[in-house]
């Protein structure tokens, strides 16, 4: 079978920057939430403690090189750096990391961008959004704004390390449903990159919250769709009875117990048969998840996750890309520590998840 091409989401949050200092206090990074996390029930694996890379600062070249060494060992082909462009006057956050990667040529590892196109808020984690405070508003201000955004991205996609699909630069949009004139955006960017002689267009990927709208995403110009993780991870919960949902809610309120989903259940619904096999669908992997460092009992987590169960998940997902021309798989994520969603070594499992992925991919090559 074709070797799976695994792209891991990469969070550039782990370094201090001016806006975080203003919002949360000097020196705040995601490590702040990771380090102060508390177990909410007996056996809850919190706080998560990094080992080999420690509580790193991404401004350090050595850290980024060591991350790449581990990713290569696991069989990951590229990092998809989360890209925070808020529109208007060219407002960005955390672009210093990818800018330095591009400017220095290091680390020498393929990369692409995932546009995290949503407003940043100080969240209270209420379902209706009440109490949230806007920190940085996401804006979509038409052609002039899209041109400025394109000119920034153009510099990056010219890099020889940038991931291409059929010669087109890979560009993922995290929340396509928030972007009302995404069709115009896609049309303009495709026209401009062709006029610049760089490519015949972008390879646009929609992170799809609503898989039933698959054909619509393709119709407005996306080349592929990757399922948003939440629907598949919470499939059993979202499709359970009203009574069961009420019981789970009671546990969250009375016993301070977050919504939990077993890893075995995640593996059961991680693949949608007859859908993920399509050439224009990019399936995903999720090694572990625990959002409680950010959201407390109002978050949710994957319980009983382990490298062994992750191996089973990888085996299941790689089968659906067998025979595809472009056998891409998105891995969520490389280093989302505050969401308990990472591959990097920790005190509990060491390199377990890295070795699990490596082992399955090695078996495929025999």
Image (spheres, rainbow, N blue to C red):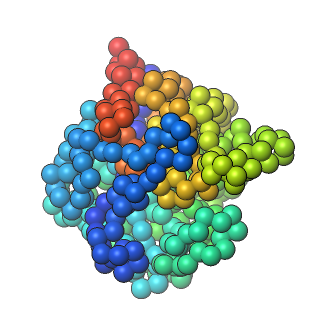
From the viewer's perspective, is 202 left or right of 267?
left
Which quarter of the picture shows residue 133?
Answer: bottom right
Up the image or down, 94 lies above or below 63; here it is below
Give the camera-side residue of 186 and 39: 39
Give the camera-side residue of 174 and 3: 174
Q: Write the residue at 41% across / 47% down.
A: 47
From the viewer's perspective, is 24 left or right of 279?
left
Give the camera-side residue of 279 and 362: 362
Residue 346 x %, y %: 32, 39
Residue 252 can be seen in this image: yes
On the rendered image, what quadrant is the N terminus found in? top left
On the rendered image, what quadrant is the C terminus found in? top left
Up the image or down, 190 lies above or below 234; here it is below
Q: Write the residue at 42% across / 32% down.
A: 4
Residue 251 x %, y %: 70, 47
Give the camera-side residue of 53 and 74: 53
Q: Write the residue at 40% across / 36% down.
A: 5
Residue 322 can be seen in this image: no
| Residue at the farthest top position | 366
Residue 225 x %, y %: 57, 49
Up the image or down, 225 lies above or below 327; here it is below
Disc count in the image?
A: 0
Residue 77 x %, y %: 33, 40
Q: Write the residue at 49% across / 47% down.
A: 39
Up the image or down, 302 lies above or below 308; here it is below
């Amino acid at each position: 079978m074709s070797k799976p091409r695994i792209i891991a989401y990469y969070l550039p949050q782990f370094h201090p920057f001016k806006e975080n200092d203003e919002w949360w206090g000097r020196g705040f990074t995601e490590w702040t939430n990771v380090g102060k996390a508390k177990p909410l029930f007996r056996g809850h694996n919190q706080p998560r403690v990094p080992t080999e890379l420690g509580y790193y600062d991404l401004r350090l070249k050595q850290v980024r090189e060591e991350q790449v060494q581990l990713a290569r060992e696991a069989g990951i082909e590229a990092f998809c750096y989360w890209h925070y462009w808020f529109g208007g006057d060219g407002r960005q956050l955390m672009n210093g990391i990818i800018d330095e990667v591009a400017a220095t040529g290091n680390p020498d590892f393929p990369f692409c961008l995932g546009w995290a196109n949503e407003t940043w808020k100080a969240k209270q984690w209420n379902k209706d959004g009440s109490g949230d405070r806007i920190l940085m508003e996401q804006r979509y201000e038409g052609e002039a704004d899209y041109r400025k955004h394109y000119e920034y991205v153009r510099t990056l996609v010219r890099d020889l390390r940038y991931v291409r699909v059929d010669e087109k630069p890979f560009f993922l949009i995290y929340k396509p449903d928030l972007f009302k004139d995404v069709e115009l955006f896609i049309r303009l960017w495709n026209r401009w990159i062709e006029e610049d002689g760089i490519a015949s267009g972008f390879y646009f990927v929609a992170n799809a919250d609503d898989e039933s709208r698959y054909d619509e995403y393709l119709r407005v110009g996306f080349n592929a769709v990757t399922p948003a993780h939440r629907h598949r991870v919470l499939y059993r919960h979202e499709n359970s009875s009203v009574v069961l949902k009420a019981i789970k809610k009671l546990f969250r309120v009375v016993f301070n117990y977050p919504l939990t989903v077993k890893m075995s259940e995640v593996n059961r619904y991680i693949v949608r048969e007859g859908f993920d096999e399509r050439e224009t669908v990019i399936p995903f992997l999720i090694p572990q998840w625990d959002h409680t460092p950010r959201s407390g009992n109002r978050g949710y987590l994957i319980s009983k996750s382990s490298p062994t169960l992750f191996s089973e998940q990888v085996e299941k997902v790689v089968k659906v890309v067998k025979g595809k021309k472009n056998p891409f798989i998105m891995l969520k994520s490389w280093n989302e520590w505050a969401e308990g969603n990472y591959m990097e070594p920790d005190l509990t499992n060491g390199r377990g998840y890295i070795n699990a992925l490596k082992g399955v991919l090695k078996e495929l090559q025999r």
